[in-house]
Image (tube, rainbow, N blue to C red):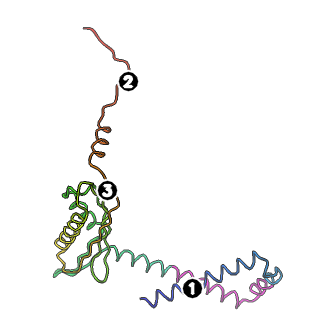
Amino acid sequence: MRFFSGLTLFFYTLVFLLVGGVCVAISLDLVPQDSIIEALNAVYVSTNTRLIIGITGLLLILISLMVTRITIGKMQRERTIAFENQDGQVTISLAAIEDFIKRAARQMPEIKDLRPSVRAEKKGISVIARVTLFSDINIPETTEKIQSIVKSRVQEMLGLEEKTTVRVDVTKIVHKDDIAKGERREEKPSKFRGNIEYTSY
């Protein structure tokens, strides 16, 4: 697979270099106009040359479609975890695991927000947790607690003994007082504007 990926990368690089070089040469007038016209006339006159160019174009299209299909399939496989049960194969979406981690983080009062990113690798499962913490906490203890809880919850949910690594990125630290003030401003009732009609009975 690595050989095929390297060969594909080399092929696309070569094609883009050739096309880019031709465009630059034409723009700088390095290729005489007469030479271009003669080359085009030779292509159109010779049936064999047109046939070769047509086959080359079809091959390029097929290779592009094949590479696109392989790339999309690889991306889909990377976004799922598959394992075998007695009754067949089970596939779990990484997005489902990320939602599960979010719900588990809501039980921790030290966390205001947590955005997980889960990747399935050969060595196991890798979790990157980007968190927003409150200011009145001990960051080393809290991050260690987050790593321990996320790791244990993921392993318990999947029932797998594969290695699970959890990296915590603290992206923001907020004060609870600022959040409370913001909530009070949002809950503040708006003043009534309009005319009140009184009806006597």
| Separation (CA) of disc 3 from disc 1 | 55 Å
Q: Residue at x 32, y 80 (%)?
A: 121
In this orientation, which residue lies closer to the viewer: 189 or 144?
144
Residue 59 badge: 1
| Separation (CA) of disc 2 from disc 3 | 39 Å
3 or 1: tag closer to the N-terminus? 1
Q: x, y (%) of residue 161?
A: 18, 80
Q: Is residue 33 left or right of residue 68?
A: right
Q: x, y (%) of residue 91?
A: 26, 75
State the image quarter where residue 22 is shown.
bottom right
1 or 2: tag closer to the N-terminus? 1
2 or 3: tag closer to the N-terminus? 3
State the image quarter where residue 13 is shown.
bottom right
State the image quarter where residue 138 is shown.
bottom left
The crowd level at tag 1 (other Cα within 10 Å; few <14, some 14-19, many 20+) is few
In this orientation, which residue lies closer to the viewer: 21 or 77?
21
Callout 3 secondary element: strand
Residue 193 badge: 2
Q: Residue at x 27, y 43 (%)?
A: 180
Q: Residue at x 35, y 76 (%)?
A: 78
Bounds of the magenta segment = 38-64
Task: Give the amino acid at mark 1.
Answer: Leu
Task: Give the amino acid at mark 3.
Answer: Ile
- In front: label 3 or label 1: 3
Q: Residue furthest right?
A: 34
The crowd level at tag 3 (other Cα within 10 Å; few <14, some 14-19, many 20+) is some
- Position of residue 99 relative to residue 6, above or below, is above
- In front: label 2 or label 3: 3
Task: Give the amino acid at mark 2.
Answer: Arg
Residue 173 badge: 3
Question: Which quadrant, please, contains the N terminus?
Answer: bottom left
Q: Residue furthest top?
A: 201
